[in-house]
Amino acid sequence: MSDPRVAFFGSPAFAVPVLDAIRAAFKVVLVVAQPDKPVGRGLKLTPPPVAAHAHTLGLPLAQPQKLRGNAAFGATLRDSGADVAVTCAYGKILPASLLAVPRHGFLNTHTSLLPAYRGAAPIQWALINGETVTGTTIMQTDPGMDTGPILLQEALPIDPSWTSVELANALGVQAARLIVDALTHLDTLTPTPQDGAQATHAPMLVKEDGFVRWTDTARQIVDRSRGVAAWPQTTAFLHGARLKLTGLGVVDGSGTPGEVLRIDDTGLTVATQDAAVLIQTVQPEARKAQPALVWAQAAGVTPGTRLDVWEPPTP
């Protein structure tokens, strides 16, 4: 199909360039985003970035509270005349009744090489797990969690310096290009079923995923920090007080996990299971981030000080 009419489902800032790429090539007849949510200390109702962008562009916009059993929204999608729908980080499971409305169904842009990293946080978990390659999959959506057949797939090497922020930006560019390609060749793409036996999962992050495990290897600690850079960020503890850490890197050193080995202008060096991690900045609770040396001097931290060793609870 050379010129399909497209309904676009997305919510966060990551999805905005994908919407723009589709809009530059095809007619977008409807944009669907999550409802406005309270944001900030004042809890002001704020639209998600895709909704705000659609409003600026003057595109038809819907923000249904729920999808399942929502006949009115089903009618809105049907009346839009969409030939196909595209989802990009929309954030809700689509019921089978809705998937059947566009005659070419729904396509999803997923930021992993499926069946690896099915779920809500593939970018973050790929980094946490130390992957060196990820990619984008364009799949035909079915009622499962990222289980539909693959239409297009392309790998992306992960730069060792990238955090989840930089990786998301690179994958967003890739996803925008691939979805336009998929929509252009909609009639000729051959769906390839996923091998469910090879599936891995990427659940939504929780705050504890950002807690430093000093008994991990130095590489594992740094990779976790890269993965949680956007949220929940890297958190360590000293005498129970939370500390946000940034600028982590692997360095030489040995000692008891969590033990401060060195403090100098380069930062704070802390022992891990196998080596050490250099920390450049520290942010105590309710205070601004500061160079690690400045924080250590004010907090009375010296070589030999032990940061709290946090271990995930046993399931």
Image (cartoon, rainbow, N blue to C red):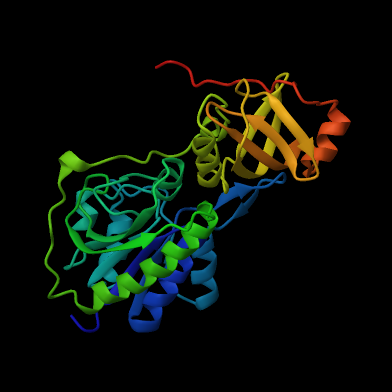
In-front residue for pair 51/310? 310
Badge count: 0
Task: Say which quadrant the C terminus sits in.
Answer: top left
Query: In percent of the image, x 63 and y 43: which residue is there?
Result: 248
Quarter location, residue 27:
bottom left
In-front residue for pair 147/314? 314
Task: Say which quadrant the N terminus sits in.
Answer: bottom left
Query: In percent of the image, x 61 and y 47: which residue is there?
Result: 38
Query: In percent of the image, x 56 and y 44: which residue is there?
Result: 231
In-front residue for pair 60/220? 220
- Counting from the top left corner in percent of width and height, residue 273 is at 53, 26
The reply, left or right, for residue 268 in relation to residue 309 is right
In-front residue for pair 313/272? 272
The reply, left or right, for residue 212 in relation to residue 196 is right
- Counting from the top left corner in percent of width and height, residue 309 is at 60, 20
The reply, left or right, for residue 48 in relation to residue 308 is left
Relative height, residue 78 to residue 240 (above, below): below
Relative height, residue 90 to residue 187 (above, below): above
- Inspect this view and state whether residue 218 appears: yes
Q: Residue furthest right?
A: 298
Q: Residue furthest top?
A: 314
Relative height, residue 104 to residue 149 (above, below): below
- Counting from the top left corner in percent of width and height, residue 94 is at 28, 50
- Counting from the top left corner in percent of width and height, residue 289 is at 77, 44
- Inspect this view and state whether residue 12 appears: no
